[in-house]
Image (spheres, rainbow, N blue to C red):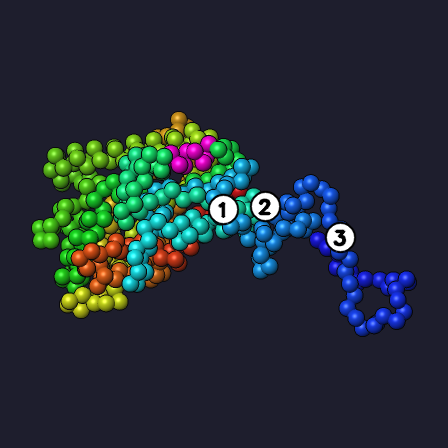
Amino acid sequence: MWPTQSPTADPTADPTADPTAEPTVPVPSPSTDPCADVPVFGDDGTCLGSSDNCDEYFDEEDNNDPDPRDGTIPEDKPVLVAIGDSVTSGHHKERNKNTDCDDRDYAYGNTLFEKMNKEKPAVWSDRDQYQNFAHSGFGTVQVLGGGTTGCGTKFEGDEIPIKKAVKVLTDHKEKGNFVVISAGINDTNWVQLLTGITTVTTLNKGLPNAARCETLLLDGNENPTFQGFNFYDDPGLPMERRDAIAALQKKVKDNVTEIVKKLAAADPKVHMVILNYYNASGTGFSPVAAFNGYKGPFLPDVCKDPVQKRLDSANGLIKDGARAAFDKDADFTARVSVAAVADLNDPKKGMLQSLFLDEALKKDAQPPGWPHPNEKGHSTIATDMFAIVKPKL
């Protein structure tokens, strides 16, 4: 840092000079170092000067702000890769605006990167180090093979998420990389099931008890018509349906194993953080009431236990799939963590987006924002994930 002590009197100074004038601070001469156009950083990552372009790296308010994106990842830096579905892609819907299916700046990955930058600004110094290949509507099948988002954008060929992630990790192998991921729920009929329960709830201005929600989750409904959850086995179900559920569970588990194997093969030292799916019971409110005056919650609080039972099963299967990618428990523990963000399960915390019912009922309706996290929710996810990531930076 520049010296801060007061300047001493100069015996050769002009005696007629104004004694009240501000003292001047000597300006160092330009460096002849051929690398002088690169900022010099201290141990804490702050810019020490000695170059003319520090301002290009850091603004006046925060000397640790990362470089803006220019599409180029610094070769010698690690990367934070996001992959998976709409929770990780930053899917959101604002009032009277088009749905943004993939918004990497809205997503928790962006906030997580900013926390990493503040912790290790010399290492996580460029926004291009955060790469988000997650897409709304994608399940494990689409992560591995490509597909179309909920907003109609196709990602195929070289744009297939796992291909993009593997390339970036390979290019930055063993530099301290991280991957954050949520994937698996879109391989099931969970979205269709929630839509059906929302409709039943609206028509009846709620649900009477947990038993009614359990029936809807297990068996579905006739009018409106939707099927029960196809990813949760129950001993009371017909054997044919149990076999179909077991087959889907195996497929998703195997896909998760393949995804994790590919990521670990690209970078044997990468650390992956899997985000657990959360319970949206007690949420889903609309500023505009339905025809009968109902404004929510569209997934009633009485569904909390029946829903949690199914999410625990799904999250467990996904974790088992990740574990199967490694020969030893120690290797799995070293490479994979699971983030279970408790606040997302609490409707009083206000972590999820609103459901704009009047917009959702339009003929050409945009995909709704609920039950995805809002900005507060994404920030909370990032905070919990940073607690996992921080010791590994």
Point out the tag, 1 or 3, that comes first from the N-terminus.
Answer: 3
Q: Which residue is mark 2?
A: 122
> Dot 2 lies on which element?
loop
The answer to whether residue 120 is left or right of residue 294 is right
Q: Position of residue 31 (x, y in %)?
A: 73, 46
Distance between the Cα atoms at labels 2 and 3? 24 Å
Q: Is residue 262 left or right of residue 146?
A: right
Residue beneath label 3, please? Answer: 28
At horizontal 25% and vertical 64% (from top left) the residue drawn is 286
Q: Which quarter of the figure has residue 319?
A: top left
Q: Which residue is mark 1?
A: 70
Direction top: furthest residue: 327
Q: Is residue 17 above or below residue 173?
A: below
- Give the magenta range: 162-170
Q: Residue at x 42, y 55 (%)?
A: 379
Look at label 1 and name its amino acid: Asp
**Mark 1–mark 3 CB contact (< 8 Å):** no
- Does the image show residue 388? no
Q: In front of the other: label 2 or label 3?
A: 3
Few, some or many C-alpha atoms within 10 Å of disc 3 (few <14, some 14-19, many ≥20)?
few
Q: Nearer the viewer, residue 234 or 295?
A: 295
The answer to whether residue 125 shows anywhere in this view is yes
